[in-house]
Amino acid sequence: MGQRVAVIGFGAVGRATASLLAARGDEVRVVQRHRPREIPPGSTFQEADVEDGEAMGRACAGVEAVACCIGLPYDAAVWARAWPRAMNNLLDGCAASGARLVFADNLYLYGPQTRPLTEDMPLTSYGRKPRIRAEITQLWRKAHDAGKVRAVAVRAADFYGPDASTSVISAYGVARFLAGKPALVPYPADNPHDFTYVPDFARAVVTLIDAPDDAYGQGWHVPNAPTRTLREVLALAAARIGVKPRVTVLPRGLAVIAGLFKKEIAEIAEMRFQRDRPYLVDSSRFAARFWRDATPFDKGLDATIASYRQRSPG
């Protein structure tokens, strides 16, 4: 008999996670503010806002695990208001129901680093978005250490894949190549950089849902394909599409000007430390305990290309 799991948030990672769980026979409850057009066969939908404590309590009731796959708008002001509320509401909901919490996290909480990222790095106080991610990490850690909940984080690098509409590789690389345009990159493209394939991220979330309690109370890094630069990944994508690997890198000065008109670009500015140097993720702890066979770039890109071709036939 499958587990009962609530998947909170139905963006790219939530959709992939819910699909994996439903496909193996788990009872999946998809939770977000608005009903999506489609949910995995056999799953159910429950409307709830993560900032509403009572609604989150109902969303967490009657399940054995909660997968937090929330993707808030990329806006520091929204994060500062909504993330602490969301995390506290999830922790309260899980405490009341006894459900375990698996948090699909990113790597912002480490802040600027000059060596490969490891799970034992201290939490940062840098910037706005990194500091907020560090603060909500402290919330779930304290709740776990106090015995209030059993909580764990699964952390991924910048991700890409068939369903990753905000990914530079997917949306600004593959989609533009297929449209006969050069890839458009808002930051340097020649530093070694790790990328996470969304289905691998979802697989890691499910792995922690299944893991014993001794795996909880800590963070785990999702395994990635061997490190490449963004330009190398885009060149591989172009080759598989059959076009020239044209890449337009937005100069920093122009990116600042563009940020005056497009908020998402302005919000990237404080995250320069992820792009102005090698950005490497050490996932050896996860690999030693669980699995290490991350999807190679050629397979991940083929699936991404196929998905975008289906959306725009011909």
Image (cartoon, helix red, strand yellow):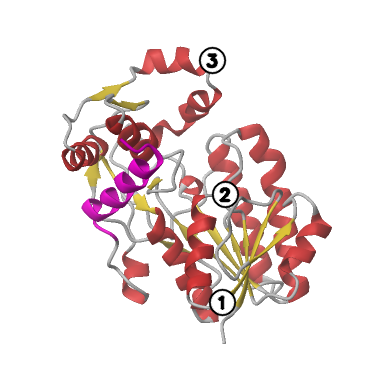
Circle 3 residues within 10 Å: few <14, some 14–19, many ≥20: few
Determine the residue positioned at 29% across, 53% down: 300
The residue positioned 68% from the left and 72% from the top of the image is 149
Say which mark, if any, is on residue 134. Answer: 2
Q: Tell us which disc is closer to us: 3 or 1.
A: 1
Task: Look at the numbered disc 1 and give the secondary structure of its residue.
Answer: loop
| Crowd class of label 1 (few under 14; some 14 to 19; many from 20; radius 10 Å) | some
* Residue position marked by numbered label 1 in the rendering: 26
Question: In this orientation, which residue lies closer to the viewer: 247 or 24?
Answer: 24
Residue 256 lies left or right of residue 284; in this view the side is: right
Q: Is residue 12 magenta?
A: no
Query: Compared with residue 286, is residue 114 higher up or lower down, i.e. above or below?
Result: above
Ranked by sequence position, the earlier of labels 1 and 2 is 1
Viewport quadrant of the C terminus: top left
What x and y, as percent, mark residue 25?
A: 53, 78
In this rendering, does residue 194 appear at all? no
Which numbered mark, 1 or 2, is in the foreground of this view? 1
Q: Which residues are magenta?
A: 295-314
Question: Label 3 sits on what residue type?
Answer: Phe
Using the image, determine if residue 151 lies above or below residue 241. Answer: below
In what element is the residue under mark 2? Answer: helix
Residue 261's disc is 3
Residue 302 within the segment the image draws in magenta: yes
Q: CA distance from mark 3 to mark 1?
A: 45 Å
- What whole-number distance in Å separates the C-alpha atoms at marks 3 and 2? 29 Å
Placement of the N terminus among the 4 image quadrants: bottom right
Q: Amino acid at mark 1?
A: Asp
Q: Amino acid under label 2?
A: Ala
Q: x and y percent of residue 162 in the render?
A: 39, 48
211 left or right of 133 in image: left
Image spot of residue 220 (x, y percent)? 44, 64
